[in-house]
Amino acid sequence: MRKTLIEIAQIENFHMRKIKRKKDVRTKVLMIFLIIFSACIFYRLFNLQVFQHEDFTALAEGQHSFYEKLFPKRGEILVRDSKTGDLFPLATNKELFFIYAIPRHIEREEKIVDELSPLLFEYKEELSDKEKKKLNRKHRNWVMSGKYWVSDDGKRTSCVWEKDVEGFNEKLDKDSVLSREIGRSFTNFKKNLKNKVSDKDDPYVVLGRKLNDRQVEKILSFDFEGVYLESESWRYYPEGTLASHILGYFGYSDDVLKGHYGIEGYFNDKLSGKKGYLETEKDLKGAWISIGKRKLELAKDGNSVVLTIDRKVQYKTDLAIQKAVEEYQAEKGSIIVQDPTTGKIIAMSSYPTFDPNEYSEVLDISFYKNPAIFDQYEPGSAFKPIVMAAALDIGIINPSSSFYCKGYVNVGKYKIKTSTGEAHGNETMTEILEHSCNVGMVWVSQKVGLSKVYHYIENFGFGKDTGITLDKESSPIIKDIKDWNKVDLATSGFGQGAIVITPLQLISAISAIANKGRLFAPSIVSEIVYSDGTNEKIDPKFVRQVISEKTALNLSAMLVSAIEKGYGDLAKVEGYRIAGKTGTAQVANPGGGYSESKKITSFVGFGPVDDPRFTILVKLDNPKKAKWGATSAAPVFKELAEELFQYFEIPPSIRN
């Protein structure tokens, strides 16, 4: 019995030790768990406090911080009315409304699409004369005749050229074509609009921009939930196409708004200004905390640019070149008016043109390039005064020196003829310009010699850009003197062969003759007006004395005779002594040689000769009517010169 009690005690003791061991294990497990858990908490806190401190600080600040970019006002481009001195903006900024939607707020999708589609859809039912000329030239005659050859595949209506007509199934008049195109365009527009407002995953979608007053008023009357109006600043050109090639345009490039071409492109940085920002704190309701920290950097508005352009003269030249291109059926044309005493550009016009407000509608991007500074061409006879100036200046001839023209001259294997093929007989140097005698100018260039001809060509500013502050000026290169041959020297006398220039280079050189041999760099900006109210005047830049004053005066008198007695008689203005020279140039083919049909006609002159107030250059590309400079460009010069004499109130220089 006693043994049994001892055994029972041992058994109980064993169980107690077993229970204690279990408790110890549990305690240890619990301790280990607490240690691991504490370590995790510690690690997490350490990670948050140390490694992710900046991230969570930024997140916390973001919940009660406010940041907004402040955009500057783009500078204006201004021109002056020289009569009144008043400034007028050709490029400014305008607040216009755009319409946007928040799709998740929209409930009546069909109603919104039905109401907004006809209001926002724009399609011109008739083409204006200006718009017709924007179309691809391949289709241009069909538009103007009111007829299209079309291929109608049920999806689109396509114009085709006459030679490709075979196989096309029907001929439609213009109204039928436009009717089909309008219907299809509207259907696609409505479908796209519905897709936009139906996309609930899109937080914000723009439905239309640059809304007019009628559209804004109508949209406000709808009071649609989820559709909103907001104003935004847009570049605005209040005078439309006026001076568009000078201005360029302001628009998108790779999703970035910037200036392109002209003044907008060249002065983009000055016009743009500098962005600013506002950073402050807000409470949970979104209201600013007045005692919170605040950082403010104001936007710096762009600077404005004042041009040398006279607004009224620019208007006259814009009209004049459009009229000339249309009247003589030219592919395009340019007019430049320059003050020969300072180099300042008074007007610069080219046609066809474009409206920078609607720059995206231009079908041919070459229209953006300013032909007056970009186009490179062989000037033909308008270049003759340059080589004649060299001969006069070095003293190997005088205006009455004589030469015998037999109608042609052989240079190497080439026979160079007069423009009419006729022999002029005995000619003075003045008569060579009057007759625009190619053979006589070959003789003059040969007398001057290669090195001197080349020197004067460079001295007059050819072979490099003029430095005018317009974007996209080209720089025609006169080939190196060592690469010239006898033919190049001969043809340089009448502006062909090795001579490649821009209209701006030519007018600047002729202005130097008008200005007693003093060459000024052409300029188109007279002043920069900074955003702080200060301004910087841009002074005329004298380049060099190209020829002597005596040479310039003698040559000017010879060029007067070229108008009074020569081929330039259609440029004559009654009561005024004008100096000038016609030009009819062959157009080089890309593969070599010259086109049999294409010509570039021009006239460049200045007046009044005794006190020149302006130089005018008129250039027409491939006019189909009146294919000579004397019969196409010269009359344009005359009409414009008459207007300028009257506008500038210049008294007649010849008394009857």
Image (cartoon, rainbow, N blue to C red):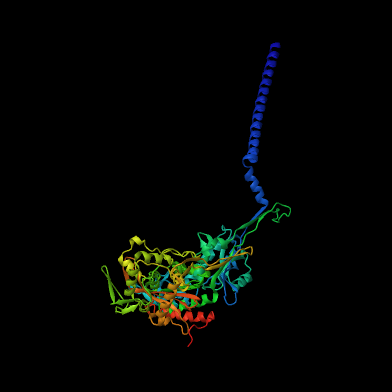
Of the pair 516 and 347, the residue shown nearer to us: 516
- Residue 583 position in % (x across, y down): 38, 75
Q: Residue furthest front?
A: 395
Q: In the image, is 533 to the left or to the right of 493?
A: right
Q: Residue furthest left?
A: 413
- Residue 435 position in % (x across, y down): 35, 79
Q: Quadrant of residue 137?
A: bottom left
Q: In the image, is 566 to the left or to the right of 535?
A: left
Q: Residue furthest right?
A: 291
- Residue 243 position in % (x across, y down): 51, 72
- Residue 286 position in % (x across, y down): 69, 56
Q: Residue furthest bottom?
A: 656
Q: Residue at x 60, y 77 (%)?
A: 84
Q: Is residue 551 shown to the viewer in this render?
A: yes
Q: Quadrant of residue 42?
A: top right
- How many numbered discs? 0
Of the pair 224 and 532, the residue shown nearer to us: 532
Q: Quadrant of the N terminus?
A: top right
Vertical side of 370 occupied by 22: above or below: above
Vertical side of 54 occupied by 200: above or below: below
Q: Is residue 209 shown to the viewer in this render?
A: no
Q: In the image, is 38 to the left or to the right of 331?
A: right
Of the pair 211 and 494, the residue shown nearer to us: 494
Vertical side of 26 occupied by 159: above or below: below
